Amino acid sequence: MIKINQTFIKNFWPTFHNHGQNSHLKSFYTFTDYWRLWVLSVLILIATALLPLCLVTIIHYQLIQKSVDSELNLRVERLSSNATNAINFFMEERLDALIFTVNEIGYDKLTNKRKLDEIFKNLKLGFGGLTDLSVLDTDGNQINYSGPFNLEGKNYKNQAWFSESLGKKYFISEVFNGYRDLPHIIIAVRSVKPDGSFFILRATLDTERLFQKLTSYRTGDHADLFLVNNEGILQTPSVTYGSIFEQTHLILPKKSGNRKIVETPPKKTDLFISKHSFISTKIVGTPFILVVQKKKADMMHTWLDLRRNINWTVGISTVLIILVISFASTFMVNKLFLVDKAKAETMLQMEQSHQLASIGQLAAGVAHEINNPLAVINQTAGYIKDLFSFKDEPRNDEEILEYIDSILDSVDRCGTITQQLLGFVRQFDIKIKKVCLKEIIADVLNFHKKEAEYRQINVSTSFPDIIPEIITDKGKLQQILINLINNAFQSVDEGCSINIIVSWITMGTIKIVIQDTGCGIPEENLVKIHEPFFSTKQGKKGTGLGLSITYGLVKKLDGTISVQSTKDVGTAFTIVLPVKIQEKELG
Amino acid sequence: MEHIDILIIDDEEKFAAMLARRIELREYHSKVCHDGKTALQWIEKHLGSVSLILLDLQLPDMYGTQVLEDIKKIHPTVPVAIMTGHGSEKDKKECERLGAFKFMYKPINIDSLMTILEHIKEVPND
């Protein structure tokens, strides 16, 4: 489980931040700035994913807003239209009743108190909504009265409604208090007496009944229906503006010939949707304007709920998208980085192998050029020696013979060296056989036995319980070990130690570590040590070929070689070899 | 016809001359050819009168393996030893396939050469 977590984290955690630590590898990377790549990838992906989401959300918002507004408008319009019709009808019905009464009954009967009481009773029964009924002459005197108030004999000459009704055939007043000190509406019908002069039949409307009618249309808490006059004074109580006769300061439409009212379109900031309509009967207008107001908040509630849901969904989706994109980008850039790194490493290795190969070719050329003159020297010296040996005269000159022998020895040694140099490129037969690691290491250490004793160098070896017997090319393995152990001996001072540790890695691979507590290799040289002719050993001691040959030999044995070194602490060469080498034709 | 113990085919004149002289000193007969064609012509003319042929691989007119193949066509039983400065493993295999009985790297040790020659002379192969 922990392992899975680690791989998971490895995949999704930016591993490319330590990119560029190895300056030698750096030059082989395709991308130089992985963070920039990551940021770019995240930004592009987020923009691509979120832009359509935001656009759709905005369009959705606008569509819903529009439909909510139009729905609200429609509702208010319907309500207003219904209520207007009802109030119109209420007024018209009562006006018609009065007209009928005047036309049918005649002035004489109307001035009769008993008769008027009877008519009033019948009207109340038939239509309702009337408070009282009275007859007035043109001077404003109340000739006859039927109703609950004690208003008989009152004179209305100075009242505004009276003079107005005298000038018109039909009249409907605003709401006012009058003598009875209670809000009421007057409906008046002017008619002609038998003597030709006018008289007025006046009825008072029951405002309570009107209020109830309005209230019955009020649906929900957020709707307000009320009547105002042309000056904006409340004619019925309003939820928003207060009780009757309060000034509302509403902007009211002007009365025109056409009954239709052009409403100013509602603004987005308005809290209400308002509709105005004039109350008017077929034959006479009224001073009333019906105002219907509906608070937007009522309808908006649903919309706001929806919007909250949308906002949450969009918010959570955005966070998810950003998270997924960030992780995906990290994953991708990580993979890219790893591939790039592998490529860079391969390139570096190729560069090194290329160097080795070209040096190898050079070595072959050099060896060839040296070999032939060496052969000539060899034969010439041999011939001189022959002359001394086969001819009689100087045959006893031992000293000269010794010198010649030394020339021949040197030539032999040179020949060996050139052969070794050629071995660097020449493909020898791989003589594969079973090799005992313990024996081979002991053989190599044997060469240094005297040196170790003399310099007091402590040499130790460590083997696993099952001593590895590996199937490989003995000569090459021997050369590898000789080179590395020689190196170790050259780098340690007196009293230091050299450890050779053999251990199993898997069933098929073993590891040989050759460790010393010597002078170490400076970091800047670590990448160069496998290069041919790179040597820090001044003078005649080193050719700079040792490690590069070792490097090539380990490769030929299908193995790997690595080095860890700290200056003044020591160096450890680690060789990993397969226990059984794959046989192949090397040509 | 004079019998030749060792025929040296090598373009390195000084080397061949020295080797020839040392062989003469040891009272054997030698002959030097500096290119493949001359050598082949000589062998054709002197069939059966040579004990051992020392053949270099790098010759100016043809490659040693070709010379070896041609020698074996003319005179299949003559022992041919290859001596080379830097012959590859591939060359070695090819020469063995073509019938060379020895593959030696320069410089050549005269004493071992003599041992080989004596051994050949003891066991006549014709």
Image: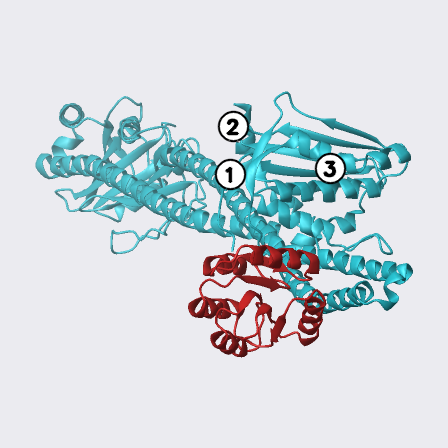
Chain colours: A cyan, B red
- Say what secondary structure mark 1 lies in: helix
Which residue is found at the position 40% from the left and 40% from the top? Answer: A272
Q: Amino acid at mark 2?
A: Ile
Q: Which residue is mark 1?
A: A323
Q: Earlier in the sequence, mark 3 or mark 2?
A: 2
Q: Is residue A270 left or right of residue A484?
A: left
**Pointer 3 chain:** A
Q: Give the residue type at disc 3.
A: Val
Q: How many marks?
A: 3
Give the SS element for disc 3. helix
- Mark 1 belongs to which amino acid? Leu
**As drawn, which residue projects farthest toward the left?**
A104
Mark positioned earlier in the residue sequence (2 or 1): 2
- The kind of secondary structure element at disc 2 is helix
Q: A166 above or below A515?
A: below
**Distance CA(mark 3)–CA(mark 2):** 45 Å
Mark drawn on residue A4: 2
| Disc 3 target residue | A444
Question: Where is residue B49 shown, x and y percent of the image?
Answer: 52, 70
Q: Earlier in the sequence, mark 3 or mark 1?
A: 1
Which mark is nearer the camera, 3 or 1? 3
